[in-house]
Image (cartoon, rainbow, N blue to C red):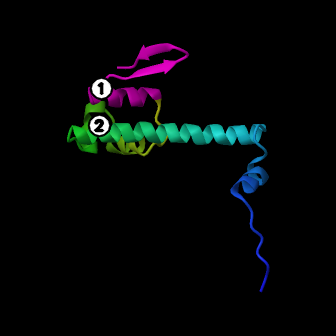
Amino acid sequence: MANLKYTTIETLENELLGEIGTPRRDAFEEAVTEEIHAYHIGEAIKAARKERNLTQDQLAELMGVKKAQVSRIERGMNPTLNTITRAFRALDMAVSLNWDNKSIALT
């Protein structure tokens, strides 16, 4: 029977993505963070749509887009700021963008 070699996830990440702080690793971690944020925005839109008892078709009509676009937004697939704002407006939600102690109302 062959001897198995165990490796930690940290070791694999370092081998495949580079050490923490390297450009390749930083780019990967930034991309993952962006995907997580997009997912959370999509989930918030989906929850608000369901709270209002709207179908994806109905929200799409209110936004002036196709149902497929609403589906992509809810799955966190590359939502643009413009599309997110349209969704929040259609759902009659007040949303603001906050950074460096500054805030801009989006809706």
SS at mark 2 in the image: helix
Asked if 50 appears above or below 101 in the picture, the reply is below
The residue range painted magenta reads: 81-107
SS at mark 1 in the image: loop
- Judge by depth and name the residue closer to the eye, 90 or 46: 46
Asked whether 29 falls inside the magenta stretch, the response is no
Asked if 39 appears above or below 6 in the picture, the reply is above
Where does the image place residue 29, in percent across and percent down from the top left?
65, 41
Pointer 1 or 2: first along the chain: 2
Identify the residue at image location x=39%, y=19%.
106
Q: Quadrant of the C terminus?
A: top left
Which quadrant holds residue 48?
top left
Q: Are marks 1 and 2 in contact (CB under 8 Å)?
A: yes
Q: Residue furthest left?
A: 53
For label 1, the residue is 93
Asked whether 101 falls inside the magenta stretch, the response is yes
Identify the residue at image location x=52%, y=41%.
36
Q: Residues within 10 Å of mark 1 (few under 14, many from 20)?
A: some
The disc at residue 49 is none
For label 2, the residue is 48
Q: Is residue 92 left or right of residue 37?
A: left
Identify the residue at image location x=79%, y=78%.
3
Which quadrant holds residue 63?
top left
Where does the image place residue 89, in percent across and percent down from the top left?
31, 25
